[in-house]
Image (tube, helix red, strand yellow):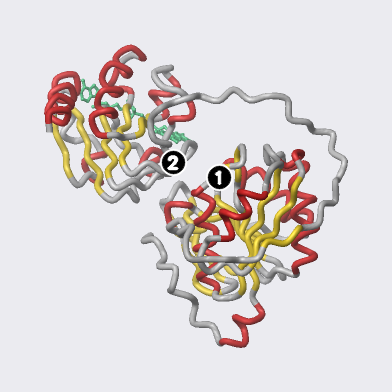
């Protein structure tokens, strides 16, 4: 699914478009707007009605000001309260529901990220709506396209709910540009709902490499790497030589070669970089579900019949322990 040009709105009659209003949920972490969530604005633009962006957390003003610069956004709704900092759905869902009711929105759109997947089903339940998950296209204001069965089939679904609660696949909608806009910022309602859930702590995997979900280049390693030591020895220099993020197959993650956060696929991250290089990965359907929309797919595998070669634009049949260091050396000299 190609990214939707921001200007390509639906061909609904102008009167209908005037009735449509979308609220795009913008994620923030430690005061920084998650650029991935800007895809929700691109999706909202496709509907053609008015668009409000929503941000909440402590010290939220600079984030709201940044979001207000996104071209095509009519208003930013901002709620200042540290209880929303970590996006706990127990706190965030009642907050969102109050603001959705106040704004009278027809569509509420968030990224299909850990935050969106955690939050939006609760919001849908509280509004008695059927949530529409992980869409890759919008056909009209009530018709949406979404992959099912790990991308093996594409379903077109129609919703008659008054408020459509939607998560979008980030790789299908380009992030809206933070430029050219000057939307007013308005304080949202804060229900300050009491919740039994409290944020205690988090343990984040730190990396100097680009973020896997948004990196333009990804090199992924599979079970063919044989061990964690070999995974690190082979994959890290390759990633550095390309300025790429590192990913992994589930077999590599389950075998302890790579961190869980690096898993690409049906039960991992969905990526669509300019370049995806699969090393020692067979190309199981569950892995393809997470990377088959990459612009250029390259694969190194010793088995010429490995299924990864069926989706690869460029393939190299050979032993990765010889080929990858050779490639890394050439790339480093280039
Ligand atoms: P293998 O299938 O074992 O392939 C290893 C490959 O390395 C082989 O093709 C082999 O030829 C090659 N190789 C070995 N040695 C060398 C060498 N020296 N040089 C070059 N090539 C070599 N998988 C995911 O990746 N992501 C998911 O999100 C995911 N979700 C799943 C969800 C469900 C419900 C299920 C049932 C499965 C899921 N899987 C997922 C698992 C998936 O089915 C495969 O088991 C997995 O992707 C295989 O990983 P792999 O390609 O690294 O390993």
Whether ligand 1 has any atom under 8 Å from the Cβ at mark 2 is answered as no
250 lies left or right of 186: left
211 lies left or right of 129: left
- Tell me the number on the disc at residue 213: 2
**Residue visible at 19% across and 35% down in the picture:** 305
Seen in the picture, residue 128 relative to 300 is either above or below; the reply is below
Whether ligand 1 has any atom under 8 Å from the Cβ at mark 1 is answered as no
- State the image coordinates of residue 210 (x, y, percent, origin top left): 39, 35
Between the C-alphas of marks 1 and 2, the distance is 10 Å
**Residue visible at 35% across and 37% down in the picture:** 284
Q: Do callouts 1 and 2 mark residues in contact (Cβ within 8 Å)? A: yes
Element type at marker 1? loop
- Tell me the number on the disc at residue 113: 1
- State the image coordinates of residue 225 (x, y, percent, origin top left): 29, 20
Ligand 1 rendered quadrant:
top left
Seen in the picture, residue 255 relative to 175 is either above or below; the reply is above
Sooner in the amino-acid sequence: mark 1 or mark 2: 1
Q: How many marks?
A: 2
- Tell me the quarter of the picture where residue 187 sits: bottom right
Seen in the picture, residue 334 relative to 259 is either above or below; the reply is below
**Residue visible at 73% across and 49% down in the picture:** 122
- Tell me the quarter of the picture where residue 113 sits: top right
Q: Please tell me how crowded label 1 is: few (under 14), some (14-19), or many (20+) other residues with Cα within 10 Å.
A: many
Element type at marker 2? loop
Q: Please tell me how crowded label 2 is: few (under 14), some (14-19), or many (20+) other residues with Cα within 10 Å.
A: many
- State the image coordinates of residue 147 (x, y, percent, origin top left): 47, 55
Q: Quadrant of the N terminus?
A: bottom left
């Amino acid at each position: 699914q190609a990214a939707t040009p921001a200007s390509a709105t639906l061909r609904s009659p102008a009167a209908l478009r005037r009735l449509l209003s979308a609220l795009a949920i913008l994620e923030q972490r430690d005061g920084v707007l998650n650029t991935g969530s800007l895809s929700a604005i691109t999706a909202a633009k496709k509907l053609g009605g008015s668009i409000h962006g929503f941000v909440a957390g402590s010290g939220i003003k600079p984030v709201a000001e940044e979001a207000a610069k996104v071209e095509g956004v009519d208003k930013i709704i901002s709620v200042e309260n540290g209880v929303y900092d970590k996006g706990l759905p127990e706190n965030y869902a009642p907050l969102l529901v109050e603001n959705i009711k106040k704004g009278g929105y027809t569509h509420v759109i968030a990224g299909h990220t850990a935050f969106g997947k955690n939050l939006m089903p609760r919001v849908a339940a509280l509004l008695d709506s059927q949530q529409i998950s992980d869409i890759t296209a919008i056909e009209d204001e009530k018709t949406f396209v979404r992959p099912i069965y790990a991308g093996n089939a594409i379903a077109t679904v129609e919703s008659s709910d008054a408020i459509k609660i939607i998560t979008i696949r980030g790789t299908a909608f380009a992030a809206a540009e933070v430029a050219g806009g000057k939307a007013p910022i308005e304080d949202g309602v804060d229900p300050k709902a009491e919740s039994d859930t409290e944020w205690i702590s988090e343990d984040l995997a730190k990396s100097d490499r680009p973020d896997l979900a948004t990196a333009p280049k990804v090199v992924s390693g599979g079970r063919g790497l044989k061990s964690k030591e070999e995974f690190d020895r082979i994959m890290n220099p390759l990633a550095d030589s390309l300025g790429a993020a590192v990913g992994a197959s589930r077999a590599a993650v389950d075998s302890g070669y790579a961190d869980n956060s690096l898993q690409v696929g049906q039960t991992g991250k969905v990526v669509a970089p300019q370049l995806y290089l699969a090393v020692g990965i067979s190309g199981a359907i569950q892995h393809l579900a997470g990377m088959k929309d990459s612009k250029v797919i390259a694969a190194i595998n010793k088995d010429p019949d490995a299924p990864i070669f069926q989706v690869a634009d460029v393939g190299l049949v050979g032993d990765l322990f010889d080929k990858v260091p050779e490639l890394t050396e050439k790339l480093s000299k280039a």
